[in-house]
Amino acid sequence: MRQIENFIAGEFVGAASGRRFDKRSPLDNRVIASISEAGRPEVDAAVAAARAALRGEWGGLATEQRVDLLYGVADGITRRFEDFVEAEMADTGQPSHVMRHVFIPRGAANFKVFADVIKNVPTEAFQMDTPDGRGALNYALRMPKGVIGVISPWNAPFLLMTWKVGPALACGNTVVVKPSEESPHTAALLGEVMNEVGIPKGVYNVVHGFGPDSAGEFLTRHAGVDAITFTGETRTGAAIMKAASDGMRDVSFELGGKNAGIVFADADFDAAVEGIFRSAFLNTGQVCLGTERVYVERPIFDRFVAALKLKAERVRFGRPESHDANYGPLISQEHQRKVLSYYAKAVEEGATVVTGGGVPDMPGELAEGAWVQPTIWTGLPESAAVVREEIFGPCCHIRPFDSEDEVVNLANDTDYGLSTTIWTTNLTRAHRVAARVEVGITWINSWFLRDLRTPFGGSKQSGIGREGGVHSLEFYTETRNVCVKL
Ligand code: NAD
């Protein structure tokens, strides 16, 4: 069993209180790690270390030197690729191919991409006239915002944490990260890499613990934190926003979703089935951009439901390293209980269960894991809880539609606005519908295809602000104007 400590000023340290909590494997519910729970003293120390680093060596580096160090972090992650894969698999139980091809490489890329952005981004300048005819010159300086509090979730822990840490450091800030209590491993491992590649002490700090009355709340309420970037549930975002209002700290929020997939009858049928299958079921449905509401044009509805059912029934549950398995569990028994409560609610609300709806039979010790079947429902009204609320599990409701106006209204009838995926070969219609769906991210004939330079974020209750490429600079830097009278 691993012992995981907080990472403060370049050192792994326990909590003064001696408090620890367990991390259990989602595969079989075994305890796999004991983690030190940061209290107020550790959060204070981490924020102080981050402030000291800003005022010290890190704050004095030229952009070029900082960029080189961040390239070093990306290389350091790649050198320890297997360790990261193994750590993330231990926390999430997801198949190794997802770790190897998406989550861990993207984590390394998050440092490279934002190092490139900061190296190449211009600042603006305005020449102005003055009554004496000599004029004045205005130019902008981009300054780091200071100490950034990073609060991250468990569903793609390393990718989502580095998506914030990469740009924060590229812009010259320092960070205190509070990873999810369900996924502490890779944040700790990144501390080792930071030391290995020579990132000055205090630039990257990690405090472990929970949300309310624990490290998460202590960090977001801390007066020494200049801005907070958060990915997680909308409800948690609301609590953090209240905390951030003390001291007028800026926030960037990537929150929940109840995303719609829209399939027109003229779509490339096989590609659409595969695309919706991935968007509903990848990572056992624990993807914020995932599709829990599917709308299919009536002429292909029955055929589509049958094809998706077939694919959902072919997943092979098992351990991440097993060659026979391609499907993992949910993150925890607690989350399993939540998802299964929605499975029961769907039936109470009158759903037709096309497939799934329960727990697969798992052999031996795996029977204790957080497994659930991929589940498809039809026949519910739009008012049903499973059609309105984010479940964050491998499930979707499919409903037929008859016109473009109807499907746009259905897709928009939600408090959320994160993403959508549209499938059609009529590109004029695709562009038209993309402009009408009220979300931050639209995919046409694809899903989860990410260019890290593009704006990423949610509308409505799915988020505040945009990150990605130069958009991240809006949050991680403070722009100052300098006016020079000539
Ligand atoms: P969560 O909100 O429960 O927890 C996220 C983090 O916040 C954890 O580290 C947790 O300890 C911390 N936290 C909880 N309460 C807190 C408080 N009061 N103060 C400070 N910190 C607190 O979310 P989760 O269950 O870990 O993740 C799943 C959610 O994240 C889903 O809603 C999903 O849609 C969302 N998500 C969104 C995006 C996006 O980009 N929009 C990406 C991934 C996940």
Image (cartoon, rainbow, N blue to C red):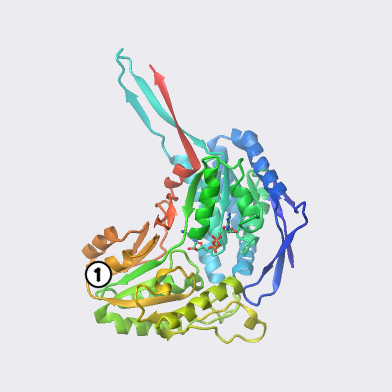
Q: At which x and y percent is residue 430? A: 26, 64
* Amino acid type at image mark 1: Glu
Which image quarter holds the C terminus?
top left
Disc 1 marks which residue? 406
In this view of the protein, which residue sits in the foreground, 78 or 367?
367
Q: Is residue 353 above or below residue 148?
A: below
Q: Residue at x 39, y 66 (%)?
A: 259
Say what secondary structure mark 1 lies in: helix
Q: Residue furthest top?
A: 132
Q: Residue at x 42, y 59 (%)?
A: 450
The picture quadrant where one finds residue 408 is bottom left
Q: Is residue 389 above or below residue 465?
A: below
Q: At which x and y percent is residue 61? A: 59, 35
Task: Report the side of 114 relative to 350 (left or right).
Answer: right
Q: At which x and y percent is residue 149? A: 58, 47
Q: Residue at x 52, y 69 (%)?
A: 98
In this view of the protein, which residue sits in the foreground, 110 or 293?
293
